[in-house]
Image (cartoon, grey):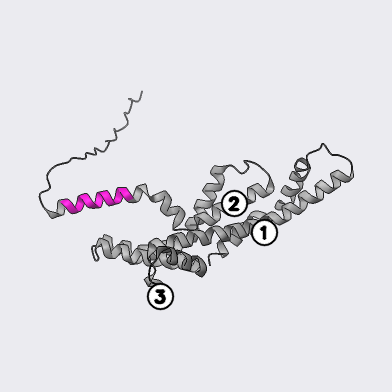
Amino acid sequence: MAEPVLAQSVPFPKITITAGEANGPPDVAVGIQILFLLTILTLAPAILVMFTSFTRIVVVLSFLRHAMGTQQMPPNQVLIGLALFLTFFVMAPVGEEVNRNALQPYLSKKIGQEEALKRAMVPVRGFMFRQTREQDLALMVSLAKVERPKNPDGVPTHVLVPAFAISELKTSFQLGFVIFIPFLIIDMVVASVLMSMGMMMLPPILISLPFKILLFVLADGWHLVVRSLVMGFR
């Protein structure tokens, strides 16, 4: 008879936060860094939405679902999850550049925190500039009442971010309009056929929905939509 074997207990980490008098500038710097990190974690959702390709992707996917008329199918969790992973895929080159030029030198203590932040913003700003229309950027510069910049480096980040968001919204609405056209044609055809047959009480959406799903599947719609979204950022 084998003796019972007890599983080894796993120690739980102990985390303590204390407040006291700082002994010197290093203690104050550590406290400021912790406060800065907590602020970044709080603003992480806004940073993900406003600094990346997430806005365009999730808006286009929402337009696609409304155009098909499938109500809550795919569910919101699926659309947001797909939008997140597509965002990670699109932003991967930018993340690699940030990691190579800013994060790794900072972790190796070769550069300071301020220099690391400046280096990290360079590829992010470059990505936003490539997707921002000139008229939207000019609008935000005029509204901010700042001197007209001579080059992209002279554009403040707080001016670039809303201009980038406006451009992303316009681009996503343009893609959504293009997606709506084939499904709208199917709805019009089905409605005309039902009206000609005298079926006034039968909802056209009930008949057109299977045809729209069939058209989307036969055309390999997910492949076309995802390809168009990703190639739009290249």
Q: CA distance from mark 1 to mark 3?
A: 34 Å
In 3D space, how far apart are the residues under numbered discs 2 and 1 (Cα atoms)? 13 Å
> Pointer 3: what residue?
151
Q: Is residue 201 left or right of residue 106?
A: right
Badge 1 crowding class, 10 Å Cα cut-off, few under 14, some 14 to 19, many 20 or more, is: few
**Residue drawn at point x = 85 percent, y = 44 percent:** 194
Mark 3: amino acid: Asn
Horizontal arrangement in the rendering, residue 15 relative to residue 55 (left or right)? left
Q: Which residues are magenta?
A: 28-39
Pointer 1: what residue?
A: 178
**Spot occupied by residue 220 in the image (x, y as percentages of width and height):** 68, 55
Would residue 184 be found to the left or right of residue 38 on screen? right
Does the rendering let one see residue 218? no
Q: How many marks?
A: 3
Q: Residue at x 53, y 47 (%)?
A: 80
Q: Which residue is mark 2?
A: 61
